[in-house]
Image (spheres, helix red, strand yellow):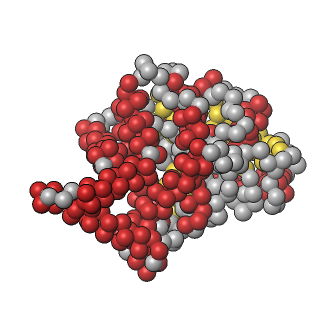
């Protein structure tokens, strides 16, 4: 239990203390430095958008990318359709033709069609092979970026020690019962990411939006499940930093059903098993990265195992401690059982999920069960690399 407390309580508190103690900026200078008319030469960027069954959002994504406040001649937009079974291709082609309208315009935009569904890692590899420039913006089709987000991201890579930069992808409340818990979770995550950026390197980019150097990205095995975290580990293993730029923000609608959030969490846990099994870990010569990795990622991935172990230990001590001197173990076991039953009741009864506390409890229970299932699927290689598109609504960033 102390290990879990370290990951879920002590480490976030340490992160908050660091955030309060260090007020220096970690982003490009705002204001005039981001003005397109100041004579600054912005780096050329290839925007890479993997898409699968995104007919409902792809037109909005194209419009969003075309409207970014970035020099049009310094950007190209590549969209890869991973064998969609809906109208993604038709909608994208219509949106692109509407942008061009018979004339050559910038930024250049191109749709690449995959003949069959292979998964996101293969889609990223295909996009990488088509990219002309040495900086890549990886962004999901359902993520809407702020107009100046790309400039804020690009400003960070002026530092040669920075290999990748990410920013906050803010969830828009979809009204689902667990949504308050999901939003709270990501608020805590963002505070940790800010602190990690100040300490050295963020432990992983947000896969919905990040900018990375071409030379930092290895070819991804076609069956890779967590492509974004694999890229993150590749960057850090090369001795480069991943920084968090809080001014470079975007929005994304939260998951609209508990089932979809469950599947997403299962996928993450299975991908974590795959990543660890393949040795995508910090190097022995990177002790601080190991501390961040264990505190922020590994313990959380192992949390269902640790919780079950703690519960069994409490139960055993409560049952087999006969003397009155050890009656505290029995009370601890009773208390643990009561908390578990209450949490399970909240997860099963929608009426108990309407409060903020109930929403948080529901999300925590859902996450732990999903992680447990994901660990099993990862160990037995039961998780396919293809990702399932969540039903999310496109929202325009304000």
The residue shown at (55%, 29%) is 279
Q: How many marks?
A: 0
Foreground residue among 355 and 1: 1
- Please tell me whether residue 346 is drawn above or below residue 1 in the rendered image: below
Residue 113 showing in the rendered view: no
Instruction: Tell me residue 290's x, y (percent).
Output: 41, 30
Report the side of 294 relative to 325 (left or right). right
The residue shown at (22%, 62%) is 330
Residue at the far left in the pictured view:
325
Instruction: Tell me residue 9's x, y (percent).
Output: 30, 49
Q: Quadrant of residue 18?
A: top left
Instruction: Tell me residue 197's x, y (percent).
Output: 40, 35
Foreground residue among 52 and 276: 276
Residue at the far bottom in the pictured view:
351
- Please tell me whether residue 215 is drawn above or below residue 253 in the rendered image: above
Residue 108 showing in the rendered view: yes
Q: Quadrant of residue 258?
A: bottom right
Foreground residue among 3 and 236: 3
- Please tell me whether residue 279 is drawn above or below residue 205 in the rendered image: above
Report the side of 244 relative to 251 (left or right). left
Report the side of 69 relative to 168 (left or right). right
The residue shown at (41%, 29%) is 289
The residue shown at (28%, 46%) is 2
- Please tell me whether residue 214 is drawn above or below residue 344 in the rendered image: above
Foreground residue among 139 and 232: 232
Instruction: Tell me residue 196's x, y (percent).
Output: 38, 36
């Amino acid at each position: 239990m102390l290990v879990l407390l370290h990951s879920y309580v002590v480490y976030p508190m340490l992160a908050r203390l660091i955030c309060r103690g260090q007020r220096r900026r970690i982003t490009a200078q705002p204001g005039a430095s981001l003005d397109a008319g100041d004579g600054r030469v912005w780096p050329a960027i290839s925007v890479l958008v993997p898409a699968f069954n995104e007919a409902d959002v792809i037109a909005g994504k194209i419009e969003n990318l075309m409207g970014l406040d970035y020099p049009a001649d310094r950007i190209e937009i590549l969209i890869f359709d991973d064998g969609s079974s809906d109208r993604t291709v038709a909608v994208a082609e219509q949106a692109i033709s509407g942008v061009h309208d018979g004339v050559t315009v910038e930024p250049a935009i191109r749709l690449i069609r995959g003949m069959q569904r292979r998964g996101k890692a293969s889609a990223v590899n295909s996009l990488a092979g088509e990219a002309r420039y040495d900086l890549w913006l990886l962004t999901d089709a359902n993520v809407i970026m702020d107009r100046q987000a790309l400039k804020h991201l690009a400003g960070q890579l002026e530092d040669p020690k920075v290999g990748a930069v990410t920013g906050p992808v803010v969830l828009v409340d979809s009204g689902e019962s667990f949504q308050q818990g999901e939003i709270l979770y990501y608020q805590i995550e963002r505070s940790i990411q800010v602190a990690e950026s100040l300490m050295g390197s963020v432990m992983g980019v947000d896969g919905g939006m990040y900018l990375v150097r071409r030379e930092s990205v290895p070819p991804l095995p076609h069956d890779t499940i967590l492509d974004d975290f694999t890229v993150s580990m590749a960057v850090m293993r090369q001795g480069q930093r991943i920084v968090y730029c809080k001014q470079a923000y975007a929005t994304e609608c939260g998951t609209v059903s508990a089932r979809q959030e469950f599947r997403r969490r299962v996928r993450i846990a299975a991908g974590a098993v795959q990543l660890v099994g393949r040795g995508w870990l910090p190097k022995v010569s990177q002790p601080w990265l190991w501390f961040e990795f264990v505190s922020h990622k590994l313990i959380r991935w192992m949390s269902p195992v640790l919780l079950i172990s703690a519960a069994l230990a409490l139960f055993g001590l409560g049952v087999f401690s006969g003397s009155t001197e050890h009656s505290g173990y029995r009370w601890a076991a009773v208390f643990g059982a009561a908390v578990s039953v209450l949490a399970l009741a909240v997860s099963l009864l929608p009426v108990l999920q309407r409060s903020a506390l109930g929403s948080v409890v529901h999300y925590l229970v859902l996450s732990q069960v999903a992680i447990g299932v994901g660990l099993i699927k990862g160990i037995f290689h039961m998780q396919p690399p293809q990702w399932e598109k969540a039903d999310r609504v496109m929202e325009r960033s304000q």
